[in-house]
Structures are given as structure tokens and as C-alpha cells.
């Protein structure tokens, strides 16, 4: 099973992805985590990506597709995959479709987590205050930029998946547990 969690930064995609991983044994593929790992390891890619991420912009589509392709072809999809923070552009969505078609796989569910953007700003401030490892992109200024990028580049993939009949929407403003049951209802309690 392949599930995409979609929503603006701070919508709770990571939290729900981790929960789905624990509950259903899915593999979570988070392009943001992969990029942060590359930065921590001091790789060439990490060094290039850091400035882009700190400014709240998007990393190049081909780099992102390459990272995801590597994971999918190394068997990540066998266990069921939850895609968190990917795809973020129409080009990434199309690239993913092409990759999955080659593997005779398809997307089962695209779940859009809808949230109030003022609440997002509050969540980001809270996350920055609570975390020992403060992310350089976890500030209200960068959040504003990331929200603009979301509206311009990522939101257009919502109608893309709606047209394909894959889209479901959950209210991400609810308690984590309530959002979790809404997601479980969508995926129908299906195991991998
Ligand atoms: P995230 O942890 O998903 O919020 O991602 C943090 C940052 O990593 C984003 O603001 C982008 O700069 C970069 N990033 C993560 N995923 C992608 C993606 N699919 N496409 C382009 N850039 C990405």
C-alpha cells in the first residue's frame, strides 16, 4: 500500500506518519528527514540543500525524485510506504507516477491534512520552543515563506490527485488521536 500525506508545513504529517509506521508497519519516507540526514552527514547534497531549506525554498525535483527512487527500488515498497513531504510539485507527482508504473505499483490513498494557517504559526513556535534540536527553518519568517511555496508549488497537486480519484481530506485541526482515527478510517484498517 502506498499512502501520501499532504498538507502545509506543520500540519502534523510527520506525527501521523510515525504513528502509521508504528501501528501498521509501514516504512515512512520523509524527503525532509533524508535531506536533514544528508546535512548531518556533511554530504555534497546536504551542503547544497541546507541553504535552500533554510530559506524555505524547494530542493530540485530531480534530486528529490532520485532520493525517492533509490528507496523505492531498494524494496521500501514491500512493507507499504507512507510518503511524508513528497511529492511537493506537479513534476514530482508525475515523476512518482512514472516510477510506480514501472514497478507495477500505484498510489492507494492521498490524504490531505487541512489546517488553519494561524494555528500552524503557533505550532511552529511551540515546536521550536520544545525541541532541543531547533531546526534552522523553524521560525515564523521561514514558515511564512514555506506557506507561500506550499500554495504556489504544492497545492496544485491536490486537484491532480482529486482528478485521479485518490484524494481524501481530514481536518488536521482536531486532536492528534482524532486525526489518527480519521486516517485509519480512510485506509480502512487495511494492513500492508
Ligand atoms: P519538511 O521536513 O518536509 O518540512 O521539509 C523541510 C525542507 O526540506 C523543505 O522546506 C524543503 O526545503 C526541503 N524538502 C523536503 N521535501 C522536499 C520535496 N519533496 N521537494 C523539495 N524540497 C523538499
Image (cartoon, rainbow, N blue to C red):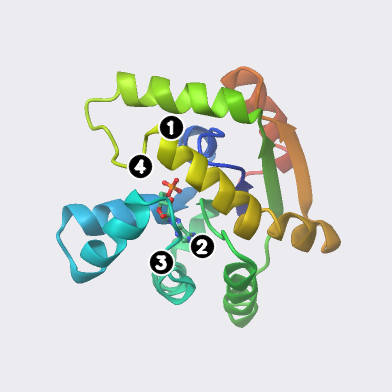
Which structural element holds mark 4? Answer: loop
Question: Looking at the image, which residue is at 39% across and 69% down?
Answer: 67
Q: Residues within 10 Å of mark 4 (few under 14, many from 20)?
A: many
Q: Nearer the viewer, mark 4 or mark 3?
A: 4
The alpha-carbon separation of the residues under discs 1 and 3 comes to 32 Å
Which residue position holds label 4? Answer: 137
Q: Nearer the viewer, mark 2 or mark 4?
A: 4
Q: Nearer the viewer, mark 4 or mark 1?
A: 1
Query: Quick check: is the Cβ at mark 4 less than 8 Å away from ligand 1?
Result: yes
Q: Residues within 10 Å of mark 1 (few under 14, many from 20)?
A: some
Which residue position holds label 3? Answer: 71
Ligand 1's image quarter is bottom left
Q: Are marks 4 and 3 in contact (CB under 8 Å)?
A: no
Which residue position holds label 2? Answer: 77
Looking at the image, can residue 192 be seen? no
Residue 36 horizontal/vertical position (percent):
29, 51
Quarter holding residue 13: top right
| Mark before the other along the chain sequence, 3 or 2 | 3
Q: Are marks 1 and 3 in contact (CB under 8 Å)?
A: no
| Mark before the other along the chain sequence, 2 or 1 | 2
| Mark before the other along the chain sequence, 4 or 3 | 3
Amino acid at each position: 500500500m502506498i499512502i501520501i500525506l499532504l498538507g502545509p508545513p506543520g500540519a502534523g504529517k510527520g506525527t501521523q506518519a510515525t504513528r502509521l509506521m508504528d501501528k501498521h508497519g509501514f516504512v515512512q519516507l520523509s524527503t525532509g528527514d533524508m535531506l536533514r540526514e544528508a546535512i548531518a552527514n556533511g554530504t555534497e547534497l546536504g551542503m547544497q540543500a541546507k541553504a535552500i531549506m533554510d530559506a524555505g525554498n524547494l530542493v530540485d525535483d530531480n534530486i528529490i525524485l532520485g532520493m525517492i527512487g533509490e528507496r523505492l527500488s531498494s524494496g521500501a515498497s514491500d512493507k507499504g510506504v507512507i510518503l511524508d513531504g513528497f511529492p511537493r510539485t506537479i513534476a514530482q507527482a508525475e515523476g512518482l507516477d512514472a516510477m510506480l508504473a514501472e514497478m507495477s505499483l500505484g498510489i492507494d490513498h492521498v490524504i490531505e491534512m487541512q489546517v488553519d494557517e494561524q494555528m500552524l504559526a503557533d505550532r511552529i513556535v511551540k515546536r521550536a520552543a520544545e525541541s532541543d534540536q531547533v531546526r534552522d527553518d523553524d521560525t515564523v519568517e521561514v514558515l511564512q515563506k514555506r506557506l507561500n511555496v506550499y500554495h504556489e508549488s504544492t497545492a496544485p497537486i491536490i486537484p491532480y490527485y482529486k482528478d485521479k480519484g485518490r484524494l481524501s481530506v481530514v481536518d488536521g485541526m482536531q486532536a492528534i488521536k482524532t486525526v489518527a482515527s480519521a486516517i485509519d478510517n480512510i485506509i480502512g484498517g487495511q494492513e500492508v
